[in-house]
Image: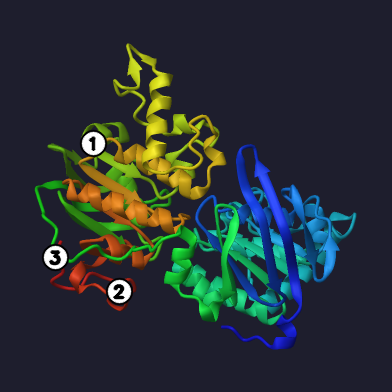
Amino acid sequence: MKTQNSSATDATAVHMVGISKRFGAVQANDQVDLRVRAGTVHGIVGENGAGKSTLMSVLYGFYSADSGSIAVFGQPARIRNAFDAIALGIGMVHQHFMLVDSLTALENVMLGAEPHVLLHKAESLVRSALGALMQSTGLHVALDSTVEQLSVGDRQRLEILKALYRGAKILILDEPTAVLTPQETEQLFEVLARLRSQGTTILLITHKLKEVMRLCDQVTVMRSGRVVHECAIAQASVEILAEAMVGRKVNMGRQGDAAPRLGAVLLQARGVAVRDALQVTRLVDFNLRLRAGEIVGIAGVAGNGQSELLEVLAGLRTPSAGTLELGGSSFTAEHWLDPSLARNLGLAHVPEDRHARAMVMGFASWESAVLGYEGLPVYSRWGWMRHGAMRAATAAMMERFDVRPRDPSLMSSKFSGGNQQKLVLARELGQAPKVLLVGQPTRGVDIGAIEFIYTQLRALRDAGCAVLVVSSELDEILALADRVLVLNQGHVTGELPIADCGEARLGLLMVETKEPEGSPV
């Protein structure tokens, strides 16, 4: 993918010198220097809270630096707000998209940048310009569809189109693959390669070091607000970057080859079928046994029934058919369990979408940290909630799971995605569940936190819990699972012990259309 010529990449697109930014007691950026060559993909990596997003927000004008200077294409730049950044040819695509759901794709691009006072004339001009952009970049989006009708990948393409329409020559992408399917990720990589070949400079904030090695020309590693390592990608490796990010050697692979010590069956599902609101079948005749002392991984491309499976097992969705046995109780499609009963029976659930399902962004973190468990005696007495006990418990969770900052009063929305995830895991694991369902356990989480989360899940398994992990990351499944089921189009296409798994074999099963004969259930 790295097809550069020296004349195109010798020029400096961005030069930041001595950038410092403090938020109260937190020094987010501390004398940071960054030089980015024009026409390259430059990776910015670091743990959650390392300061990389703050630095890029300074470049885009969301924050003003306390000190330091910025030059763009060799010219001193004063960037006071996003309008200044856009005028300088800088665009930013945020991890959480800045789109209006009820407007069409075309209207979102036009919003605030109408080229004509007459609406129909403006729409015609923008449609024509976007047609040319889509043709040259490969960023194809249905312009007359509302944003709420678009897939996540289409929304991201729309955000990039919006930035390019406004004249971006420097494009900042914040965790661009965090919520994409593997197919959408491949499409994005192709688009970024094309944009680079056309001279666009790309700054890539990501936790995924394999993506850095594949996409980037240069990489800068930040830790605790400072630059601790920078090099050409040819001099880097995943191991070198991981150690620079965390400050020590990191091991996220399998921990020993000992077979799991299996106990009793703690959850059993038979013949589970799910149809969505449009009566489209999402899960077909699904069978599962979860035993104490094992981690079972569910592999597959996102959108093939994994989300529906988690919702059914957690009591968030009623199946159209099937039975479930949990904690000595039996359930049928006519009388399914609910989330409250599931918790009482020892089942904990870490949802795939922490914002929609696991936290309330407008709540203080201590409130999010007790959601679903506020009725426990430790948190309530005679019908009155014990806020002091809840705050103290949250402080203990934050200490144990290294949630930063350790402030139970801070709004849930103010934490980074990785620290939000650690807080949700602390809440669910803290109840010593018998069965744990985890969806996308490390989505948007930095490499040091990933190692910590893996350790916690393994410890829970070794303590006799049955753990079900759904992940779109094959590396994650291979690192954690003792047994793997593959889902495709709602069908189980294979079930394998981890010793028989590999990326190639699982990849083939992920495109199978039905379960092979003889697969165990």
- Residue depicted at 45% across the width and 65% down the height: 242
* Residue 335 marker: 1
The front one of 135 and 425 is 425
Q: Is residue 366 left or right of residue 286?
A: right
- Residue depicted at 31% across the width and 22% down the height: 378
Residue tagged by mark 2? 512
* Residue 323 marker: none
User: Quick check: 500 above or below 440?
Assistant: below
Q: Quadrant of the N terminus?
A: bottom right
Q: In the structure shown, which secondary structural element does the residue marked by tag 2 occupy?
A: loop
Distance of mark 3 from mark 1, alpha carbons? 28 Å
Distance of mark 2 from mark 1, alpha carbons? 33 Å
Return the x and y of residue 390 as percentages of the image width and height: 40, 25
Amino acid, disc 3 = Pro
Amino acid, disc 2 = Glu
Q: Quadrant of residue 306?
A: bottom left
Amino acid, disc 1 = His
Foreground: disc 3 or disc 1: 3
Q: In the structure shown, which secondary structural element does the residue marked by tag 3 occupy?
A: loop
Return the x and y of residue 496 as percentages of the image width and height: 19, 68
User: Quick check: 410 above or below 126?
Assistant: above
Residue tagged by mark 3? 520
Q: In the structure shown, which secondary structural element does the residue marked by tag 1 occupy?
A: loop
